[in-house]
Image (cartoon, grey):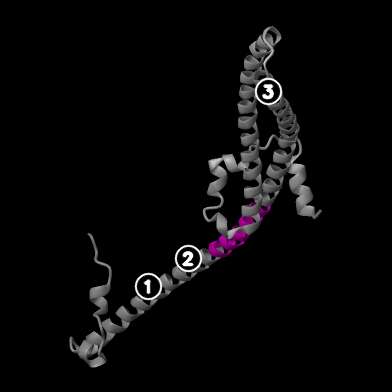
Amino acid sequence: MSKKDELYEKALMGKKIPVLTLDNKWYKLFPNLNEHPKILNLARNLNDLLKRQGKLNTETKDIKNIKKHLMQEIVPMVDELEQNPDKTLEKKIEDHKRLIEESNERLESYQDELMEMPALIEQANRELMLATMEYCYENMADNTDEILRITQWVKDIREELKNNLVKKQEMEIYNRQMYAYMHDIFGADVIEMFDMKYNPLEQAPKRTD
């Protein structure tokens, strides 16, 4: 067992884990479950056990009802046979006894399997939980690395933007100073002379006073 698995096992120790595949919030972790074969197989195994448990409970209930019906029918038939021996009735009684015995055997088999189900479901659920924790840990670790990278990028961009804004402001001030000087010497035609794209004086911030 790896150190991470030991860590996960320790985290789960003594915890009551809900059945993951019955929890809608669990599915939100895997919007595309088919893209995760390991998780998908573990989830299917757990669901198969849950379905089997449900089927066993349903069939147990049905067999008990059938057995109860057979018992209710056989009692008066036995009484009647004692009063009036009849081969046909005797065969019906034997058939009922056989069906009751078969019902008892199936009930016993189902009961044994049902007793094993909670442990099997808990184990399958635990394995799925461990795989889920591993998936979440790895994704959160990857996301954290990317978050830190983007955070640094934003910080660098802000610093670069700040420096460029200062540089832009300094260059605009310098252009206004040069333009004013050249304007004083050459007059208004200085813009055409230097093929300038804009008039630095017009681009200067307007005064509000």
Span of residues in magenta: 134-151
- The answer to if 138 sits in the magenta stretch is yes
Q: Quadrant of residue 87?
A: top right
Q: Earlier in the sequence, mark 1 or mark 3?
A: 3
Q: Quadrant of residue 135?
A: bottom right
Distance Cα–Cα, label 1 vs label 3? 110 Å
Amino acid type, mark 3: Lys
For mark 3, give the secondary structure.
helix
* Residue at x 48%, y 71% (from the top left corner): 160
Q: Which residue is mark 3?
A: 91
| Residue 202 against residue 126 in the figure, above or below | below
| Residue 66 against residue 204 in the figure, above or below | above
Q: Are marks 2 and 3 in contact (CB under 8 Å)?
A: no
| Drawn side of residue 138 relative to residue 33, left or right | right
Residue 200 locus on image (x, y percent): 27, 78
| Residue 93 against residue 197 in the figure, above or below | above
Q: Are marks 2 and 1 in contact (CB under 8 Å)?
A: no
Q: Nearer the viewer, residue 81 or 21?
A: 81
Q: Which residue is mark 1?
A: 169
Q: Which residue is mark 2?
A: 158
Residue 193 locus on image (x, y percent): 23, 92
